[in-house]
Image (cartoon, grey):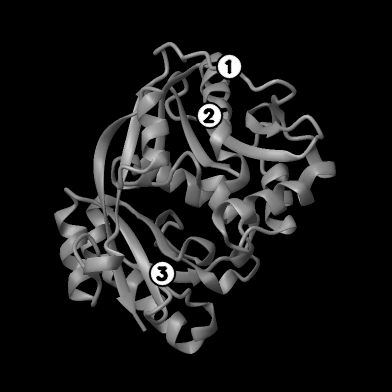
Amino acid sequence: MEIRQRAFSEENDFRAMEALARATRPSNLHVTDLPYRFSSWPQENPENIRLWSDSNGRLVAWGMLEIPHEALDLACLPEMEPELLSQILAWADERSRQHPEIIPRGTPKDGQCWFVNVFSDQSVRIRTLEAAGFACQANVGEYSWSKVFMQRPADLPVKDYRIPPGFVVRPLAGESELEAYVDLHQATFRSTVMSVAWRRRILNHPAYNPDLDLVVAAPDGRLNAFCICWLDNITGSEIIGQIEPLGCHPDFRCYALGRLALAEGLRRLQAHGASQIYVETDSWRNTAFQIYESLGFQVSKDVLVYRKDY
């Protein structure tokens, strides 16, 4: 079968990429929340995305250098992966060596690198990554890193939590609160990668539902926490939900506002008919993991993080 490689060229390519990820859901960490990643600012440059199609024009694989998340995202038909995964990795290598300015910095003491997330049972993908120079980060000392994919049945009742007096959980007020949201996001994650342009593209994405874009506002109107929920109708009858992202301003974490936003998000996903709800988080038993666990999420799959330095 003849396989053709090409650059991203039009908005419809995103729809085809989403469809391929949906069709290969068991092998992909990011499916329902892809609109969030596809809206980010590196996608302003089509050279950060590569597509592989068969002789009939059917998309069979894609790769995307997702700079804000320091990751190489990809999707591939399982029967094509032994042939095409090495090509995706080779494209990422070539792109990175030609334009080293796009490569994120992995840790304060180390150099530039890309990460690839893989489920722990994906042995073929793991062998291909290792052959291409990627190394597992699960046991590398101070900067060890691994993740989990957590799942929650949507029909599980959601706990009620007391809202501090004067605070309110509500949807984001659209364009008028974009800058306030970006300031909150940057403070929460201590990162400047979130931008107004990225947030605006999220609002304009066809999969975006304003009813599921939640914030917690203080009595003075200041935004203090957020939770964006995504829906994906995968079979025409079954609806999947996913949380991405969730966060709370460091100055207000004593109020458990992130938990309030998450609980309201879960209730709204239930109201929209979701049968299962997923979230990806670090495997450390930290505050985020504990919040998810307290609201009924359980580990579904272990996720290994592979890294390649440049």
Q: Position of residue 225 (x, y in %)?
A: 63, 38
- Upstream in sequence: badge 1 or badge 3: 3
- Decide if residue 257 is on the left or right side of residue 135: right
Residue tagged 3:
4
Q: In the depicted view, which residue is nearer to us: 2 or 135?
A: 135
Q: Position of residue 203 (x, y in %)?
A: 71, 43
Identified by mark 2, the residue type is: Leu
Q: What is the number of the mark on residue 162?
A: 1
Question: Residue at 51% of width from left, 29% of height from top?
Answer: 259
Please identify the quarter of the rendering in which residue 85 is found: bottom left
Residue 273 seen: yes
Mark 2 against mark 3, which lies toward the viewer? Answer: 2
Q: What is the number of the mark on residue 207?
A: none
Question: Residue at 53% of width from left, 78% of height from top?
Answer: 102
Q: CA distance from mark 2 to mark 1?
A: 13 Å
Q: How busy is the neighbourhood of tag 2: few (under 14 within 10 Å), some, or many (20 plus)?
A: many
Please identify the quarter of the rendering in which residue 224 is found: top right
Q: Secondary structure at mark 1?
A: loop
Q: Secondary structure at mark 2?
A: helix
Q: How busy is the neighbourhood of tag 1: few (under 14 within 10 Å), some, or many (20 plus)?
A: few
Identified by mark 3, the residue type is: Arg
Residue tagged 2:
262
Question: Residue at 73% of width from left, 35% of height from top?
Answer: 172
The quadrant in which the N terminus is found is bottom left
Q: Secondary structure at mark 3?
A: strand
